[in-house]
Amino acid sequence: MFSFKDCKIESCHTYVATGSEYCYRHSPDREEILSHTNDLLLSPEPLRDYCITNAEFGPLRLPDRKEIIACNFACCTFHNIDFTHVYITTSFFDFSLFDHCIFNDIDCRYSVFSGSKLIHCDFSGSFIVHSNFTGIDSLDSNFSSSDLYFSTFASSYLKDTPFEDCNLKKCDFRFSDQRRISFKYSNYQEARS
C-alpha cells in the first residue's frame, strides 16, 4: 500500500507523493514528479503502491492490460485519458475530475471514486464490482453493458448517464438524484434504491 505519511509542511495533512518528503502540491520537484508519474502510467509494467494527489494528467492512452494496484490519485484531474482494458484494484480516485475519459472494458475492484466529477466519460462494457461512486456528479457519461455488482452510487447526481443492460445486483442508488437516466434491460429491481 502507498505511504500514509503526511507532507513535511507542518500545516499540511496530505499524504506525501511517492519518493518525496512532500505532497505533490508542496514539492519543489513537481514537474519531475509529474513526468515520472506519466512515464509510470505509460509503462506496461504494473503500477503499485503509488501516491500522487492534486495533480493534472492528460491526454494519455494507457497500455492495454495496464494494472493500477493499491494507488492513491485522490483530488487529481484527468483530461482525455484512455483507460481502456485497464485493471484497477484497491485504488483511490476520490474527489477527482474526469473529463472526456474512456474506461471501456476495464476491470475495477474495491476502488473509490466517491465525490468525483465525471463529465463525458464512458465506462461501458466494464466489470466494476465492490467499488464506491458515492456522491459523484456524473454528466453525459455512460455505464451501459457493465457489471456493477455491489457498487454504490448513493447520494450521487446522475444526469444523462445511462445504465442500460447492466448487472445492478446489490448496487446502491439510494438518495441519488437521477435525471434522464435509463435502466433499460438492467435488473434495477435487484438494486437498492
Image: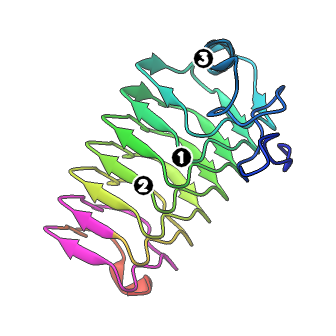
Q: Which mark is residue 25?
A: none
Q: Position of residue 129 (x, y in %)?
A: 58, 61
Give the structural element (helix, strand or loop) at label 3: helix
On whether residue 164 falls in the magenta region, the answer is yes
Residue 17: horizontal and vertical position, in percent? 75, 33
Using the rendered view, name the quadrant where residue 29 is placed: top right
Cβ atoms at labels 2 and 3 below 8 Å apart: no
For the residue pair 88 and 22, the one nearer the viewer reads as 22
**Label annotation for residue 38:** 3
- In space, the residues marked 2 and 3 are separated at their CA atoms by 28 Å
Q: Amino acid at mark 3?
A: Asn
Q: Which residue is mark 1?
A: 75
Number of the front mark, 1 or 3: 1
Q: Which residues are magenta?
A: 157-180
Q: CA distance from mark 2 to mark 1?
A: 25 Å
- The residue at the point 62 percent across, 65 percent down is 130
| x and y, in percent, of residue 193 in the image | 37, 87
Closest to the observer: 94 or 151? 94
SS for callout 1: loop
Q: Which of pointers 2 and 3 lies earlier in the amino acid sequence?
A: 3
Extreme residue in the left direction: 180
**Which amino acid type is marked by label 2?**
Ser
Could you tell me residue 73's position as x and y percent?
62, 41
In the rendered image, the vertical position of residue 107 relative to residue 131, given as above or below: above
Report which residue position mark 2 lands on: 146
Q: Residue at x 59, y 58 (%)?
A: 112
**Among the two numbered marks 1 and 3 on one chain, the one whose residue lies closer to the N terminus:** 3
